Image (spheres, coloured by chain):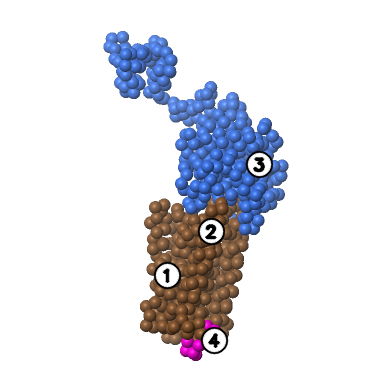
Amino acid sequence: MKAGVTRLMVSMTGLFLLLMILFMADLFIGSTRMAAADVIRALFSHGTPGDEIIVMQFRLPKALTAILAGAAMSVSGLLMQTLFRNPLAGPDVLGVSSGAGLGVALTLLALTPLFTLPEGSLLAGWGLILAAWAGAGAVMVIIMAVSARMRDIMTVLIVGLLLASAISALVSLMQYFSNETMLRTYVIWTMGNLGNISYPQIRALAIATAAGLAIAFTMVKPLNAMLMGETFSRTVGVRMQRTRIILLASASILAGSVTAFCGPLAFIGVAVPHIARLLFGTTDHRILMPATALTGAVLLLVSDLISVLPGGGHIIPVNTVTSLIGIPVVLWIILGKTGLGRRF
Amino acid sequence: MGIGGVIAETGELVVGYRNRKRIFTVMKGISLQARRGELVALIGRNGTGKSTLLRTLVGLQPPLGGKIMLDGRALHDTGSSELPRIVSYVSTEPVAVRNIRVRDVVALGRFPYTNWIGTQTVADNEAVAAALEATGMTLLAERRIDSISDGERQRTLIARSLAQDTGLLVMDEPTAFLDLPSRYGIVSLLRSLTREKGKCVIYSTHDLDTAINEADRIWLMTEDGVSDGAPEDLMLRGILASAFESPMLSFRVNDGTFSFVRSRQSTIALEGRGKAAKLTARALARCGYTTGPDARLTVKVSEGSHGQEWSVTDGMTDRRYSSLYDLVANLPDNDQSD
């Protein structure tokens, strides 16, 4: 018991320190070379206007977004994996990100031109988030209904895949009818971008993430019971209907908000919970949930650092990096010695 | 601890499934009883509704009619937070999680007693330790659930049920998929819980042998209805035999076991004594021979120079064998004999 607690404290503290170091690194390293002293001066508003713009308007929001988005997507994935009892569940795999994307596409491609709202209006912040929530929630409800009928993990994954395809077909149709500027905004959005986000948007993302995480954390006890199956959960007094709705809402809020501002971030949601389980050697959501949030934030910061490392003003889309990190983890789950569906 | 008060009782219970379109009745007129300190085995052939009855009993699905009383209270009047303190349930659902320790699984049984985040108090830890001890899982408590045997996994789930600290423990086929020693191990564990902890354990099983030999009470489900009584009561009334007998299977009342009916019967004389003779009779019976006098063939069991020996004579020729396998393999096909 004692050794376990010590190991837990060391792992948690280590992960938190790593997060801080990576956060600083993300401020100091970017596609433009800057001396460390210049970055510090810029942070405290004593730098040159050019430096200040790079640090305060680009690097700082990007690093903050990486932390928020990493934590939110990963915890959303964790909730879905336990809820659907499916180790391959995640916002992108089950089409929830696509659902959020549909909400965004409707807002960006269909509604905005109709109402010609000014830049930075409500629609660009909370409006976008609400649309993404609705889209994510709608897909979640469909997946929930399917998984209630079909116990088979593969069936649910295939339905998620089909939903994602159907949504992307719908979005293509919308793209066909939208103008060039809108189209460009949308295409850039789909690449997954942590940088194109304003402070009001970060505030909205922070509030939504905090709310989503707080709701998720109130559910750690039923989540632990759900590891033993629905029958057990019900016989120890978990009110399944209510629990499912809360978990669905929380996962939709988390994945939807991130997707609204950063685009569909690939593989973070599926992979990170498994990395956290491996790191902490536990299935207890009381530990796993904060561990997953921290690991997700760390992983997205690392992905972001890698994406700017080429230097010389080039940035590769962060989605490319998260995919390259996430896909091996997913492969490991599928090909692992205990096989798909056996590793939690 | 002797047998105590009634803890579970059903009256004219109707179980089955209901959806928007129609009602599907699985079994009706179920009137059963179970007391504290009793081991109750629910038996019946496949499809008679054992699982449906158990699920209804623990409140997982609503009854279609009749009443259920648990610990002196009607089930439908018992709140969702009170029921888990009266009855615990182990289903046939496999544990999908692999990376979880035995102790953590058992600790989940404390769910109805812990706070919102599931903090284990001293009392909770004591209950978990006691449950591990009673099921013989203390030494394996830190092992991962995927590193123990099927029998040990079943013990873990029983420990979880025990940690839930209910007077009534209901289990759906806890001995399914286990080998013979594990099956006996589980049933004797369940029996010890009734004797030492005063629990009432109701379990469904296809393992008639252990049910008849270990259970205090049998709930027998057949297509015609449900019977309730001591194993011997049901045997005496001939219900047990009629429930399971088929043209292939006959029930032996004396030792309470079933055996296959052999269509081909002929008589063979057997000479010999002791264990070897008994086993010879058994081997002959397996091959469709009854033993008795006035037979064409005679089998003699004797102690030869190289151990046990068998000789078969029909009055003219005499053949010797050194194993029962060789003996029965060389017996004439009894369809042609006689």
Answer whether residue A47 is magenta in the image. yes
Whole-Å distance between the Cαs marked 2 and 3?
A: 37 Å
Residue type (three-letter) at the residue carrying disc 1: Thr
Which stretch did the figure color magenta?
Answer: A43-51
- Tag 3's secondary structure? loop
Q: Which residue is mark 2?
A: A8
Whole-Å distance between the Cαs marked 2 and 4?
A: 39 Å
Q: Colour of chain A?
A: brown
Q: Earlier in the sequence, mark 2 or mark 4?
A: 2
What's the residue at 51%, 72% (across, down)? Answer: A20
Q: Earlier in the sequence, mark 2 or mark 1?
A: 2
The label number, if any, that marks residue A322 in the structure image: 1
Find residue A295 and report its horizontal and vertical position in percent: 49, 66
Q: Is residue B285 above or below residue A76?
A: above
Q: Colour of chain B?
A: blue
Q: Which residue is mark 4?
A: A45
Chain to which mark 1 belongs: A
Q: Is residue A340 above or below residue A313?
A: above
The label number, if any, that marks residue B167 in the structure image: 3
What's the residue at 58%, 37% (across, down)? Answer: B190
Q: Residue furthest left?
A: B317
